[in-house]
Amino acid sequence: MPIATPEVYNEMLDRAKAGKFAYPAINVTSTQTLHAALRGFAEAESDGIIQISTGGAEFLGGQYSKDMVSGAVALAEFAHVVAKKYPVNIALHTDHCPKDKLDGYVRPLLAISQERVAAGQNPLFQSHMWDGSAEKLDENLAIAKELLAEAVKAKIILEVEITPTGGEEDGVSHEINDDLYTTVSDVERTAEALGLGEKGRYLLAASFGNVHGVYKPGNVVLRPELLRDLQDGIAAKHGKADPFDFVFHGGSGSTEEEIRTALENGVVKMNLDTDTQYAFTRPVAAHMFKNYDGVLKVDGEVGDKKTYDPRTWGKLAEASMAERVTKACADLRSTGTKLK
């Protein structure tokens, strides 16, 4: 199937919310990790989301110029070609973009999709994220409002992060403290600024103790039940049940119970990066250790070309990451839910 159209992406999100499941959103940094994510979704018979962070886009742009827009566009165009060979619907998304990178990343990408839509085509990406969590909420929402209006012109969904997620992600970092919990007042101000769909659809990354990176279960106090308080607090005031489409950031190490509670309370997208990075790299490390004499020209020998051929260890990496994606689909209950 081709990359999801705006209509298909909206249907995907609607079905996830109604069915109380979520799509894994897999960060990719190469054509091979892209194929690994696509393969994982296909094997799970789940539609999904593939995303590129600012750091990932810079890496994709090449170390000579490190141009984020070129990197993101190149991989998105590649995805539009190869995704047709996989029997699932895939939405393309850009991950965390802080204020100082908007002009070099999200705004140019929005302009590209606006040009495509004006020419009768579909947008290049289906959603973009504005990460204003480092800004005061008033400024965060003012920028979100401007970006949402631009996203509507491109038939794109905006993702906003209104309060901090702990840890570090592509240069944006927050302490792990009591600020990591969104309040009803925070979402009331969000609804006032962005509406509840009438000004354009958006995904909301609310904080319930989330932390980016690696942590063991129990080291971070997640409170996914907080999302129910946020939903009900706005529903009571605006008369719209479950008004928010939530995103789960910083989910590494989450328990099955925590994930299930988040799904029941409106999470439709959960980001995965740390776990899939490790899944991709682990078999490569094993291959290098096991085939030391083959991958290196030890003592002047020539090594074994078949052993150091990137295709040899790259296939292992792709298979391992794909397997981790299928597990994510099972964890988020999206297995077998693909649109026909």
Image (cartoon, helix red, strand yellow):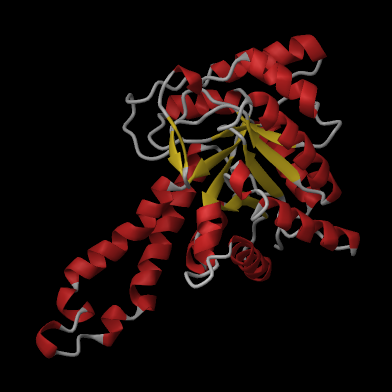
Residue closest to the eye, 127 or 241? 127
Can you say whether 83 is above or below 278 in the image?
A: below
Give the percent coordinates (x, y) of residue 268.
63, 35
Viewer-side residue, 68 vs 77 = 68
What residue is at 56 percent from the left and 46 percent from the top? 25
Q: Residue furthest left?
A: 299
**Residue 157 visible from this viewpoint:** yes
Residue at (58, 47) in percent of width and height: 95
Q: Residue furthest top?
A: 236
Residue 173 position in % (x across, y down): 45, 37
Q: Quadrant of residue 283?
A: bottom left
Above/below status of 204 relative to 58: above
In the shown orientation, is residue 243 left or right of residue 338? Answer: right
On-image quarter of the N terminus: bottom right
Q: Residue at x 29, y 84 (%)?
A: 306
Residue 275 x/y as whole percent: 40, 47
Q: Is residue 153 left or right of residue 270?
A: right
Would you say residue 339 is visible in this rendering? no
Q: Residue 39's x, y, as percent?
A: 52, 61
Instruction: Give the residue displayed 38% in from the left and 64% down from the top.
Output: 317
